[in-house]
Image (spheres, grey):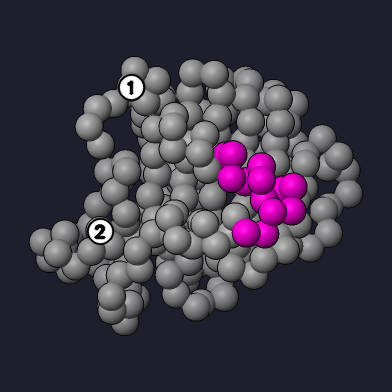
Amino acid sequence: MICRTSEETKSERLFRNRIKPHLKAKKPRTLPASPRQRAASGEIVVLPVSDVTHLFNHEAMLAVSHAIEDLAADIGEGELVSTFQHVNHFVPQRERYLNLAKRLHAVRVWAEGEPPTGTASIDFIPIFHPELARYWVVLFDSEDIHAVLFCKQANGCCESPKKVFSGFYSFNPFLVRCIRRRFSLLACGMDGVVSHFERHFSPRMPDPLEDIDSLLAPA
């Protein structure tokens, strides 16, 4: 990245303030996706650098996701876009998202399955493309503050605590709005956009993946 905008710097500063309680409550662990970036298998990055592709375990994904959601609640305007793979994963966050819908201009949730009752204030969009179900995205876009967590599942595990995701988080307003625009196109039924996601936005998968479990195992 050549330079950072003032909006990007401000967004990151606010985000880092919001993620502190989530880092204390959980044990998020991340690793650089590229083996060349690993100094040693025991070196763990508590909070990865933004705009760099990393491997995230489930706790790290939740910590970054909740920090972006808290940031959105603080700002009190703008749009929040989240993917939940399946609506069953949304249910534990139901009240949290209903509160967000009261504060923001729009809250859009992508998930497979029928929306829960009593959530009319949230825009549910069905995931109709199987490849899209592998993405974990939490995006917040407002006039001045922007943030996105953009990851794709890197292993085939079906149990949430054991899932590993490869991706990044960013506060770049141009990237955030580019991804937000493509989700809007997907919501309109433009299936071809998925192939664009796969070509240009899918984080590079680490090769090989066999060592993921050992690297993310408790020290």
Does residue 136 lie above or below 177 as drawn? below
The x, y position of residue 25, in whole percent, is 43, 45
Tell me the CA gap for discs 2 and 1: 25 Å
Q: What residue lies at 82% left-to-right and 35% top-to-bottom?
A: 121
Q: Report the front residue among 138 and 188.
A: 188
Q: Which residues are magenta?
A: 180-192
* Pointer 2 or 1: first along the chain: 1
Q: Is residue 101 left or right of residue 52?
A: right
Query: What secondary structure is found at the residue carrying circle 1?
Result: loop
Q: In what element is the residue under mark 2? A: strand
Residue of label 1: 5
State the residue at coordinates (62%, 41%): 81
Residue 45 is at least partly visible in this image:
yes
Q: Indicate the quadrant containing the C terminus: top left, top right, bottom left or bottom right.
A: bottom left
In the image, taking residue 125 as reference, residue 48 lies left or right, namely left
Position of the N terminus, as image quadrant, is top left
Circle 2 Cα neighbour tier, 10 Å, few/some/many (<14 / 14–19 / ≥20): many
Considering every residue shown, the one lying at the far right of the view is 117
- Residue 53, picture quadrant: bottom left
Residue underneath mark 2:
32
Q: Amino acid at mark 2?
A: Pro
